[in-house]
Image: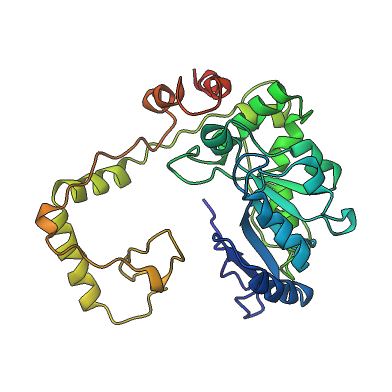
Amino acid sequence: MILRNIDAEDAGTGNHNLIFTSALTEQPLQLARTAQRMRNGAGFIYHCSEGQQGSVVAQEFTDAAQAGCLRKTFIGIHCNALASADWARWPKADAGAVVWSPFSNLWLYGSTTNIPEARKRGVLICLGSDWGPSGTKHVLAELKVAKLVSDAKHFDLSNRDLVQMITSNAGAALSRCWPTPIGTLATGAFGDVTVLRSSGTSDAWTQIVNARDRWRWTDIVARLNAVRKDPAKALAHAQGRRRAYAGPMEARVAPLELALDMPSGGGLATASPPPEPSKVMIPPLPTLVHDKAFFNDVHGRGFHGGLLDGLGAFYK
């Protein structure tokens, strides 16, 4: 498995600020500063306008447009609150990309991003599974959800279109921000290549959409459950490792450090140890795979009106 930290990737330049990100709403002045960075070549990944159409969060996209952020290097995460008229704010000549998370959108809001309108504007569509509490476990399952949504809502997406959303489209969007191409077989490009073995007579795109994950996470689950069983012992062990380590935190052998997901992550959000570790109660782990327990939680819950129930059929 190959993972890249998009926030910090320097693409061989030594510059770790090729892409700026924000999961929080940026005010007009900050958006103006970001737009200036974009004019100088930087990219901007923005958690933008997540919610129902017509809700107040649509203003985030409007503010980004007025600040001059809607450029080829703008990658909007979600944008499901946008109406057709909102998409018209994004000039076709400057069409960037959107990260689509249909499961989370439908689960939380009962609706999802207007993908046909975005594609009409020339916007690249990438797929993301959002976060654990409201998303799928990985993009292979999100691919199946996108298939269900496309068929139900007549988005007219082929299986090839869908597979491109987790491969070449994402690479094309990032290549606009990095001097090194990614997501394509070209001289000098990042060598991130996945080779798949055929398992049937259907075309490759259909096989990928229908493919089932085989991950079990046995070792990880066992280690996490050991922490659940005795949090105080696990904390003492982790603190001992950290005190004994004097190297850089980005090194491979550095001890793990807990950083909160919100509001900003990183060092400023590092969690402090609980005052009484022996009294900490950690709830059972949610399922880490798409199993019966996951599908039982999906059926009859959320705001998807039954549309997401069809995901289980891919795993029978």
Residue 251 shows in the view: no
Q: How many marks?
A: 0
Which percent across, then down, holds residue 291?
A: 41, 27
Q: Residue at x 66, y 27 (%)?
A: 149
Q: Quadrant of residue 246?
A: bottom left
Q: Residue at x 79, y 61 (%)?
A: 72
Q: Is residue 102 above or below residue 200?
A: below
Q: Residue at x 71, y 68 (%)?
A: 178
Q: Is residue 58 above or below residue 46?
A: above
Left or right: residue 260 compared with residue 37: left
Q: Is residue 52 above or below residue 191?
A: above
Single out the residue that lies furthest toward the right.
Answer: 93
Judge by depth and name the residue closer to the eye, 33 or 154: 33
Which percent across, then down, holds residue 135?
A: 50, 39
Q: Is residue 309 above or below residue 218?
A: above
Left or right: residue 65 compared with residue 287: right
Q: How is the image coloured?
A: rainbow
Q: Quadrant of residue 117?
A: top right
Left or right: residue 223 compared with residue 60: left
Residue 228 shows in the view: yes
Which percent across, then down, holds residue 294?
A: 41, 28
Left or right: residue 242 compared with residue 166: left
Q: Quadrant of residue 129?
A: top right
Judge by depth and name the residue closer to the eye, 237 or 65: 65
Which percent across, then down, holds residue 262?
A: 43, 60
